[in-house]
Image (tube, helix red, strand yellow):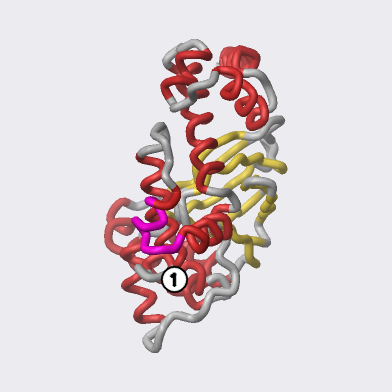
Amino acid sequence: MHAVRRSRTNTELVHGFYHPSLCIVARGAKSVLLGTEIYKYDASQMLVVSVDLPVASQVTRASFAEPFLCLKLDLDPRRITELAFRVYPHGLPKVRENRGVCVGQADASIVNAATRLLELMADERDAELLAPLVVEEILIRLLRGPMGSRVAQLGEVESSMHRIARAVDWVRAHFDQPMNVQALAELVHMSPSAFHAHFRAVTSLSPLQYQKVLRLREARRLMLMAKLDVGTAGRQVGYASASQFSREYHRLFGRAPTQDIAQLREHASRTS
């Protein structure tokens, strides 16, 4: 669990990864871009992420007087499994929508519990003894709510969500290697057609598109942090063609690699 505080809005999208989590906003607003889909949430809504997803985000309402405040609670599949069996002793409900991210109305009881959780953090003794109980309360209320069926799939080994999460783990670990979609489908015990359909349903991307985003983001990191040149960074993440790398980089980040890195460094120097 951690709290997020921002005193200004973003002028540009911030690229990053969202892991399985529950996000509760106390003040301000934020937008998350997944593929071509935009998810907006504020104090009236909660964001739930069920699988590792490459997203771009933007704080859309924040100021020094009224900063963006958000509590992010990680969702542990093993803990979810334990609680789901207690919440749904007669079997998990069917999932109508498999997307790995969703926005729903903020539940007052969950918001109340989240507030108590933050208050407990002020006292180390209270946090150690009582915080786990409040976290469990939040998870149970989440499982019992409108988004509970999606969350419950996190720990259900035979669910499509869990299988795609396993595939995502493999892609993240081997993003710089050639991908064999059929072999990946076999790894998670799906037919190639079913795997492709479920992967896109959960992540909004095809397996190859997901891999491409990982490659481009790692190349960006290498150029920015390790100061690799464009050609070397592209080859290191698996691109054989420098022109293809530059073209796809521009498509994702909106600028050519050299121009993008120069602007990122300039922005970092201004804000440091």
Question: Is residue 165 shown above or below 83?
Answer: above
At 63% across and 44% down in the image, what residue appears?
68
Name of the residue lying farthest toward the bottom = 90
- Image location of residue 83, percent across then percent down: 36, 74
- Image location of residue 66, percent across then percent down: 68, 42
Residue 249 lies in quadrant: top right
- Image location of residue 62, percent across then percent down: 69, 40
Which residue position is annotated with label 1? 152
Question: Is residue 142 shown above or below 171?
Answer: below
At 50% across and 78% down in the image, what residue appears?
144
Question: Is residue 212 shown above or below 228?
Answer: below
Q: Look at the image and say whether residue 92 sits in the magenta stretch.
A: no
At 64% across and 28% down in the image, what residue appears?
253
User: Which segment did they paint magenta?
Assistant: 183-191
At 57% across and 35% down in the image, what residue appears?
15
Residue 171 visible in the current orientation: yes
Q: Quadrant of the C terminus?
A: top right
